[in-house]
Amino acid sequence: MKILIFSGTHSRHVFIHETICKYFDVCGAVVMEREPTMPGKTIKGTSNSIIEWPLKEQELYKLHFKKRDIIEKKYYKNKTTKIYNSYCDTLNVTPSELNSQKVKDFILSKKPDVCFIFGVNLIKENIMNIMPKLSINLHLGLSPWYRGSATLFWPFYNLQPQFAGSTFHQIVNEPDAGDILHQTVPVLKQGDTLHEVAAKVVIQSAVDAVKLLKIIEKNKKIKLQKQKNSGKNYLIKDFEPHHLNVIYNLFNDNVVDEYLKGNLGNKTPKLIKAF
């Protein structure tokens, strides 16, 4: 089974895809350059300047991403996309080139049996049309409850850390909306912070990606389930620094502890499982 991967350049993207490279015949990698992981003067994808916010919110914003950087370096070891060169041919593209003719030509030259996508922008119909029938996207978020952007943050803001997970689904020309193959959540433990849970989601997703692809490699049938429309598509512009007050000032990043104590209700997601 030949797998072609679509990857972003953040260390969490590389962590997932390197795991897949270790177990399968990866025939090629389309690598899309992503924005810096540490914040600049504006929120990614918006024109909101952080200097327009109260000083306390600016500091919270910086703290939030500093904590994420520390955790990601701990768990993902600053992995870079250069590692793909030791496994397969690599095509590096900008976001504007993701749906270009050169990507189309690259896919056609590799003739993959499966595409595995994690960390790139929306793949458009002109590219989807020449991809194999089984093209799987990994979404860090439980669809349909948490679709779109920052979908491992919003469960914590909504005091639902048990809804921080990931969804493996077929790609369609709408974000995070395809038929679902599998979903996973990590085991929450006392002392887990927001970013630690996010890292645990990525690590569990890497394990489950290998299991899922091994099932596919053995030609075992996986039941796909259509997504219902109950849930929300979170946009980049939905996030503002004052939302961080809930995590850090109200709960001191102890939302998981409060959930495990039974102080945040007992609602749990009904997951779709392939194994």
Image: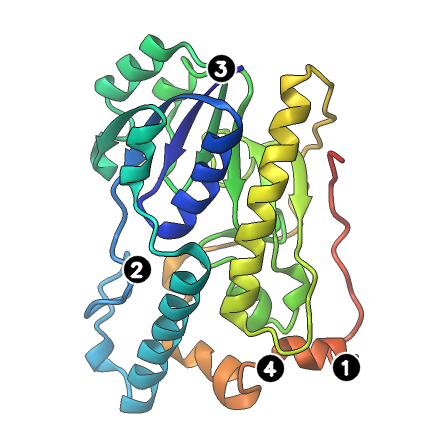
In the rendered structure, which disc, 3 or 4, sits on the residue that comes first in sequence? 3
Q: Few, some or many C-alpha atoms within 10 Å of disc 3 (few <14, some 14-19, many ≥20)?
A: some
Q: Residue 84 carries which label?
A: none
Quadrant assignment, res 52: bottom left
- Identify residue for label 2: 37
**Residue 275 location (% of width, % of height):** 76, 35
Q: Do the residues labelled 3 and 4 touch (CB within 8 Å)?
A: no
Quadrant assignment, res 220: top right
Q: Few, some or many C-alpha atoms within 10 Å of disc 4 (few <14, some 14-19, many ≥20)?
A: some
The quarter of the rendered structure image containing the N terminus is top right
Name the kind of residue labelled 1 in the image: Lys
- Identify residue for label 4: 254
**Residue 182 location (% of width, % of height):** 67, 38
**Residue 94 location (% of width, % of height):** 21, 37
Q: Distance between the residues labelled 4 and 1?
A: 11 Å
Q: Which mark is residue 261?
A: 1
In the rendered structure, which disc, 4 or 1, sits on the residue that comes first in sequence? 4
Q: Distance between the residues labelled 3 and 4?
A: 43 Å
Name the kind of residue labelled 4 in the image: Asn
- Identify residue for label 3: 132
Q: Residue at x 57, y 58 (%)?
A: 200
Nearest the eye: 34 or 43 = 34
